[in-house]
């Protein structure tokens, strides 16, 4: 699943007429980078959630985009703007898309640039065998998030509260999930989110971490949360 429903307020005026995931880095829309990487790794069946100017995303990629030298993907769209008049936040959007997803699935944000991240089958199979409900890739803290989000225990468990100030990292948005994470006791929204309930992801992850149901690893490759026009300009330089 590619998360692409955000308004991109901090990216204005660039996002007044273009959805943030379609802003280009080195000649490609931001969201196309992970879409190509997923297709290259054999994960070509995707769900894209949309809201702000979402029709532009559907027009750009259609239902079966062909990525040169990579292959053809298959895309289903979860149009939160059309169905509910606005984005449902991360967890609300994932639950809305559950009927389109498998029992285990990747999620990444369409506005994060991590050009060297590999969505490997080995990572997928290892997660399936682990029995965990989520596996997160964390990154060293960028300047705009100096305190980080989560910690990593020596045995690979993700920690709700970091064990030391220098052991906290930032959530990259890249993760593997089981559908069971988005069901009781961690999430009370019915599958498919028929009422269009807005819900953030962090409380669900923290509750699952407290029950040792989330693992994590550190990713040290290039990674940028493209949250401002300045960050986009730096990438394109």
Image: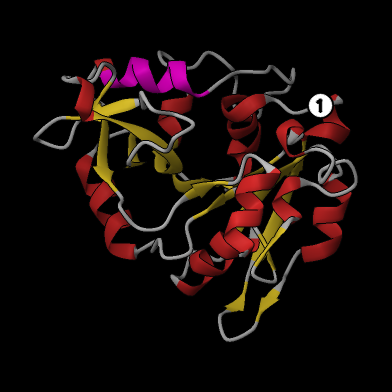
Residue at 25% x, 44% y is 217
Which residue is under mark 1?
A: 86
Q: What is the crowding at mark 1: few (fewer than 14 residues within 10 Å), some, or many (at least 20)?
A: some
Q: Is residue 197 left or right of residue 167?
A: right
Q: Report the coloring of the rendering.
A: secondary structure
Q: Depth check: give the residue in front, 103 or 64.
A: 64
Expressed as whole percent of the image width and height from the top left, the position of residue 197 reads 69, 17
Residue at 87% x, 44% y is 53
Q: Is residue 187 left or right of residue 138?
A: right
Q: Is residue 205 above or below residue 96?
A: above
Q: Is residue 105 left or right of residue 189?
A: left
Q: Is residue 86 left or right of residue 205?
A: right
Dividing the picture into quadrants, the one containing residue 178 is top left
Q: Depth check: give the residue in front, 144 or 150.
A: 144
Q: Please say whether residue 171 is one of the residues in the magenta stretch.
A: no
Residue at 86% x, 61% y is 59
Q: Is residue 220 above or below residue 201?
A: below
- In the displayed orientation, state which residue is furthest to the bottom: 69
Q: Is residue 145 above or below residue 126?
A: above
Residue at 29% x, 56% y is 123
Of helix, strand and loop, which mostly describes the magenta segment?
helix
- In the displayed orientation, state which residue is furthest to the left: 154
Label 1: element kind: loop
- Residue 110 visible at all: no
Q: Which quarter of the rendered picture does the C terminus lie within?
A: bottom right
Q: How many marks?
A: 1
Expressed as whole percent of the image width and height from the top left, the position of residue 55 reads 88, 50
Q: Which residues are magenta?
A: 201-209
Dividing the picture into quadrants, the one containing residue 142 is top left
Expressed as whole percent of the image width and height from the top left, the position of residue 221 reads 35, 58
- Residue 66 visible at all: yes
């Amino acid at each position: 699943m590619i998360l692409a429903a955000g308004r991109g307020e901090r990216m204005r005026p660039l996002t007044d007429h273009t959805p943030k995931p379609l802003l280009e880095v080195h000649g490609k829309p931001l969201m196309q980078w992970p879409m190509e990487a997923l297709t290259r790794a054999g994960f070509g069946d995707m769900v894209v959630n949309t809201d702000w100017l979402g029709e532009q995303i559907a027009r750009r990629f259609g239902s079966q985009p062909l990525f040169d030298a990579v292959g053809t993907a298959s895309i289903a769209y979860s149009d939160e703007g059309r169905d509910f008049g606005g984005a449902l936040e991360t967890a609300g959007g994932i639950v809305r898309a559950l009927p389109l997803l498998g029992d285990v699935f990747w999620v990444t944000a369409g506005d994060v640039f991590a050009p060297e991240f590999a969505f490997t089958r080995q990572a997928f199979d290892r997660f399936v065998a682990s029995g965990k409900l989520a596996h997160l890739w964390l990154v060293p803290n960028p300047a705009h998030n100096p305190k980080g989000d989560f910690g990593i225990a020596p045995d690979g468990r993700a920690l709700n509260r970091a064990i030391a100030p220098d052991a906290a990292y930032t959530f990259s948005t890249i993760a593997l999930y089981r559908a069971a994470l988005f069901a009781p006791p961690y999430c009370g929204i019915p599958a498919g989110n028929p009422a269009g309930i807005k819900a953030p992801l962090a409380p669900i992850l923290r509750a699952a971490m407290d029950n040792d149901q989330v693992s994590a690893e550190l990713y040290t490759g290039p990674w940028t949360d493209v949250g401002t026009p300045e960050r986009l300009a730096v990438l394109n330089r």
